[in-house]
Amino acid sequence: MEILRRWYRDVPATTVLIAASILVWLITAVQSRSLMGNLSNSRLADDWLLWGPYVSQDGVSWFRAIGSMFLHVGVGHLAISCFMLALIGREIERAIGTRLYVVAYFAGGIFASGAVLWMDYGVPTAGASGALFALMVLLVGVFRRRGADLVAPLVLIGVNVAYTFISSSVSLWGHLGGLVAGVLMLPFLFSSRRAVRWGGVVGVLVVGCALVVAV
């Protein structure tokens, strides 16, 4: 427990995001009575799944644009997201501060949701990968700020982009949407001026919200 308390004190937002993803998965698993097919026969999954026809039927639902970021298909999907968030999110939260990190995380995720609704309207989508792709781009800025070698974060992005194009089980536009969101935030995020940092990140968040609303 002491390790968890230290981790929370160090990166509270990352800890809460991971815990929320695990909690949502547990709820869907109980509702569906399945560890791997947890999005089937789950009321929560039905309410939060990002799918164009549901959005058209129900109107703009922020539970779908945001809640879908916390839905995961099976234990493997959940484990990968939590591992990546612990690995990348921790570095970014410590570098830019918890509040700005939270806004950047949701800016990436909502922007990715908007991209999915515009470009992949008929494909059901769930997962945190859009936000994670945005964080991968921001990790480049963290390394650059530290004067560290950029090879590692660039290879991480390259491998994940390549996997996106060769795998049929991932959301192409969710990943690319998150990638674009990260690229848009990156020039502002490490400015010496607080107003520029916040203005850039909030601006991407606003554009992402506009994409969702305009579908």
Image (cartoon, rainbow, N blue to C red):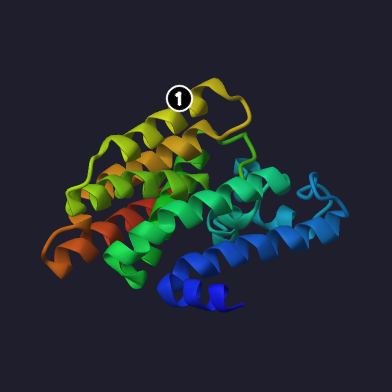
Q: Is residue 25 left or right of residue 84?
A: right
How many residues crowd mark 1 within 10 Å: few (<14), some (14–19), many (20+)? few
- For the point 60% across and 49% down, the residue is 55
The quarter of the rendered structure image containing the N terminus is bottom right
Q: Is residue 26 left or right of residue 103?
A: right
Please say whether residue 215 is visible from this viewpoint.
no
Residue lying farthest to the left in this orientation: 192
Residue lying farthest to the top in this orientation: 166
- For the point 84% across and 60% down, the residue is 31
Quarter where residue 106 is shown: bottom left
Give the residue number, with chain letter if any, for mark 1. 162
User: Amino acid under label 1?
Assistant: Ala
Front residue (pair 65, 39): 39
Q: Is residue 4 left or right of residue 210?
A: right
Quarter where residue 191 is shown: bottom left
Front residue (pair 103, 95): 95
Front residue (pair 53, 43): 43
Q: Secondary structure at mark 1?
A: helix
- For the point 57% across and 62% down, the residue is 18
Measured as percent of width and height from the top left, residue 4 is found at 56, 73
Measured as percent of width and height from the top left, residue 215 is found at 48, 45
